Amino acid sequence: MKRNKMYRIIRVSSAGLATMLLGCVLSFAQERDLVKYVNTLQGTDSEWALSYGNTYPTVGLPFGLHFFSAQTGKNGDGWKYQYKANTIRGFQQVHQCSPWMNDYAVFSLMPGIGNLVVNEDERALAFSHDRETAKPHYYAVTFDNGIQAEISPVERGAHMRFRFPRKQKAYLVLDGFIKDSEVEIIPHERKIIGFVNNGRFVPGNFKNYFVLEFDRDFKSFGTWENTGDSIRAGNLHDAGKGVGAYLEFAPGATVQVKVASSYISAGQAALTLEQELGSAKNFKTTKAKAFDVWNTLLNRVVVEGGTEEEKATFYSCLFRANLFSRKFYEIDENGDPYYYSPYDGKIYSGYMYTDNGFWDTFRAQFPLSNILHREMQGRYMQSLLDAQQQAGFFPTWSNPGMSGVMIGNHAISLLADAWAKGIRTFNPDSALRAYYHEITNKGFWGGSNGREGWKDYFTKGYIPYGEIHESTAKTLEYAYDDFCGYQLAKAVVNDFYENVFGRQMYNYKNVFDPDVNFVRGRQPDGEWLPDFDPVEWGGPFTEANAWQYTWSVLHDINGLIDLIGGEERFNAKLDSFFTMDQRIEYGSYGKEIHEMREMLLAEMGQYAHGNQPTQHVPYLYNFSGQPWKAQRQVRMVMANLYNATEQGYPGDEDQGQMSSWYVLSALGIYSVCPGTDQYVIGSPVFEKATITLEDGKQFTIHAKNNSAQHVYIQSAKLNGKAYDKNYITYADIINGGELEFVMSDTPNISRGTDVASRPFSLTK
């Protein structure tokens, strides 16, 4: 954003320069301290059996190449930081987008005093949360033994500071994590250089080259390895499994460490250190710059009114909505972007992004980024096509390379949504051709690499249950994806692909059984899977049951209404969904999985907000003539299931999806069907929200008389004119303007009920 402002200033005349500079100064002077609301411990009280977010206290810049975090769990444990823990064993470079996927390119630093202790369990130090600060730009903790550790980030590294108590030996231990590593200590330069190679989804030649530069002389040093904790005092170089290093400093020292790393080369790591930390005179400088980056971004969405707790929830979620996908490119000596490909291990010019599971994030995180980060999204869409060329298929969950985890072919949703919103930085015919290859082949990596059961899907119109697990869920996801392909083809007048994808996008109807009024599993011979129970989890469904997946027809809600038997039956079924008995049958899982437990804790019937397939469902009343029910239900979800504490989420906070759901919903809108230009209206939390777009235009949402009880929209105006629709368009937002609601504690059962007021659906 700052570079863009500088670019615009350079282009204006000298007469206008002073005026624009004054405007920029006034703009920045008006920025509020919104970082104070962010709690990066939100969602950290999680474990394998129950997720309140499955997060860690991330220290990083928006979409940064590397993040950092305190580490309470053992090396290799996906739950790297748990709020209930009372010791910390390291401060890691991290990239983890989910504990279920684990991490890669990890190493850690840990301070100690007295005798040298390298073992990860034995070196762990006790701490308490009342001596811990967890903000996006700054993490600090003072251990019970008096050591203070601090971290502030840059995009591709970090600045750390360790304060040691007097009269005891002071150590820093570098841990090479799991798998292979190499370290070289350079005392006269006060440096450690080397690499780590860890991660599941990485090419064979993967390495993360790091450089650590210290501001104090080493009293002693050596290497060690964490498989047997053997120490080699005075050794300058070592390589092997779990190799690390240690340094001793003078008692009572304050030690600053500048850290940078690269996937390309050791030389690039050194260059990055100079680019991003070379001008940092001290830790305070880096901390202040990181604060400015985050505060400027958070000020892009200024909310007014509401409680302090609601603001804390909003800005903590806005923080997490701007972490993933991670930049995976670096800047060469000429200032140009280039990257190591996590797909084929080669070096390319340009931009690359990774660490994202699209099954989660296509629903809200990308539609939110399309509003806030058009330039980045344009680069991202081209990087998807580049990744497809390098890997043979689109990524579906990169970490950082291809994994094929989860289901669907949702890269096409990202591409179609960007195109529908005017982000047109890629060749659409190339995207359609790549998607056609995607859906007519099965790749080597997991269920979402290519398309499982694609021949049956084309010939039978559904995926049979049997050899292919989660078949009904896949049929539904594929139908939506094919709609996105159809939308893109139609927009660019590609008749061939429009016809191909247009034939498949109604396949959701082939797994709906009108006799039971649900979607369900179907056998190869066309017969329904016997012994149907709509609350039984697994089998034909992904982390869900028939009650939850029946609503997964994002592109044709009117068609679903017809299948269910009309609006009256549809609304009655929706009502039941949120209020019915919470009975669970474990089904193919055979036991309670954490998503089941989270649904029970939510106490909203069979609605399972902790998992993605139902997150759009409260908004469906907008399609069926009862929008006031959507307003009430959305506000209930936000009030009851979200907060800014360590138990802040009702399930996994997957790469910003759950946070983005909250951010959009708190603004009063949501993207029910990405691939169209519409955001469906809900009920805003705040009296006023001002979104500042990349070009400086502003879109403001007013909600007069808003409160925790006044959740219903009585009337609306868009840019001063009465507005009865249940959606706004992307153009309404991006062109700037004002959406004004008048709120009440009583529903207006006549507003937004006309057919013309309803959001997009394939079936008219």
Image (cartoon, grey):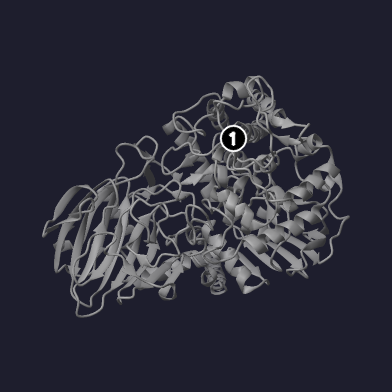
Q: Extreme right residue here?
A: 750
The C terminus, quarter of image: top right
Pick the front one: 33 or 96:
96
The crowd level at tag 1 (other Cα within 10 Å; few <14, some 14-19, many 20+) is many
Identify the residue position indicated by label 1 in the image.
539
Where residue 292 sits in the image (x, y, percent)? 47, 68
Figure check: 57 above or below 499? below
Indicate the amino acid at tag 1: Gly
Residue, x 42% and y 62% (percent of image)? 59
Q: Is residue 147 visible?
A: yes
- Residue 414 position by quadrant: top right
Pick the front one: 638 or 47:
47
Q: Extreme left residue here?
A: 234
Residue, x 58% and y 69% (percent of image)? 312
Q: Is residue 573 left or right of residue 522?
A: right
Q: Is residue 8 visible?
A: no
- Residue 570 position by quadrant: top right
Q: Is residue 684 left or right of residue 348?
A: right
